[in-house]
Amino acid sequence: MRAAPGFAALVMAMSGRLALAADDKMNQLNMPVGVTDVGKSIYDLHMIILWICVVIGALVFGVMFYSIIYHRKSRGAKAASFHESTKVEIAWTVVPFVILIGMAVPATSTLIDIYDFDDAEMDILITGYQWKWKYEYLNEDGENVSFFSNMSTPQSEIYNTQTKNSNYLLEVDEPVVIPVGTKVRFLVTANDVIHSWWVPELAVKKDAIPGFINETWAMANEIGTYRGQCAELCGKDHGFMPVVVEVVSKEDYASWMSEKQAEAEEIKSLMAQNFSMDELMSRGKAVYQRACQACHGASGEGGVGTAIAGSDVATGEIAGHLNIGINGVPGSAMQAFGGQLNDVEMAAVITYQRNAFGNNMGDMVQPIDVFNHKKG
């Protein structure tokens, strides 16, 4: 963090920073210090401005109450007869000007740091969907790695049939992983409506707007798991769109990235395969539980979405079922999953829906069928 000017440093010293200890229990009503240099700068700036306001408030109210108590009419006080004072006019112009300059210097310094995107060591494209996040690691030397991150809080906790854990509504199946001590640039956009990617301890909050790409960055100094959520009212399930960032060592990050790249290669090889009914049903059940169950019910009974059990779609033509799964239903809560599920996952979940919940159609959809349907 850049050195604060003398005036700001004096005010900070007056604050007695024992009250600003790193212990989170002492600061539950305050913003977090965070684990980035920018976060610490923002926190210090926040405290500087806070204590300037406290001092000004104390002086103003002190003078006001002194005047009320010791210069009241019942004590025989008489109002002064002067009309104006040049000295007072100059004082209440110059003093606020000096205070504003004292606040502007550290604020400008911090803003410059916040918008310094240069020298980023890696880029991650973040795309907001209703109601999940897609992360794509942009790799100049090879294939990009991408995945969706969905909330993993169980329905039993949401509907109060099980005790809520400490990370209620702040859990995901796939966290975004970044290496410690690495400047990461986040490119933030959205697929449908306006979202906002917010992780307080990384000092990052950036709107995700369809058709626009906003930039922000972070360099975490401490290994750990940091949680946030969508900070924009993006729809009825806005509260079910968490963000989890895992900061790991550079060695662990390299190992994680290798695993993700291997998974991507495996998916490519699976695209050309034909699966048995048992394999499709097993994969399809896992995909259904992750992507469909929240709306269509654990037993296909429906809820937010229509019922799968006995539905005209799941027991009708395969082409129509594929079309809805891939392209969604405009004007409804049924999203287009063609860009969210790969062809293997789409083939499996369509097969599962057509054969589970008593539908028993006997149909099998293979990845090549999904690929051909997309191609038209």
Image (spheres, rainbow, N blue to C red):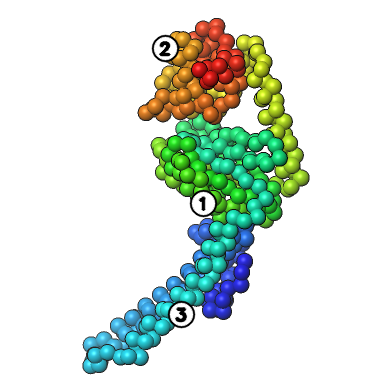
> Which residue position holds label 2?
312
Q: State the residue in front, 257 or 241.
A: 257
Q: Is residue 293 above or below residue 29?
A: above
Label pair 2/3, CB-CB below 8 angstroms: no
Look at 67% across and 24% down and name the residue there.
268
Q: Mark 3 falls on what kind of element?
A: helix
Q: State the residue in front, 167 or 35.
A: 35
Look at 47% across and 76% down and name the residue there.
101
> Which residue position holds label 1?
205
Mark with earlier residue (2, 3)? 3
> Which residue position holds label 3?
98
Query: Disc 2 to disc 3, how far (Cα)?
Result: 72 Å
Q: State the residue in front, 267 or 95.
A: 267
Q: Residues within 10 Å of mark 3 (few under 14, many from 20)?
A: few
Q: Mark 2 falls on what kind of element?
A: loop
Look at 64% across and 52% down and name the residue there.
120
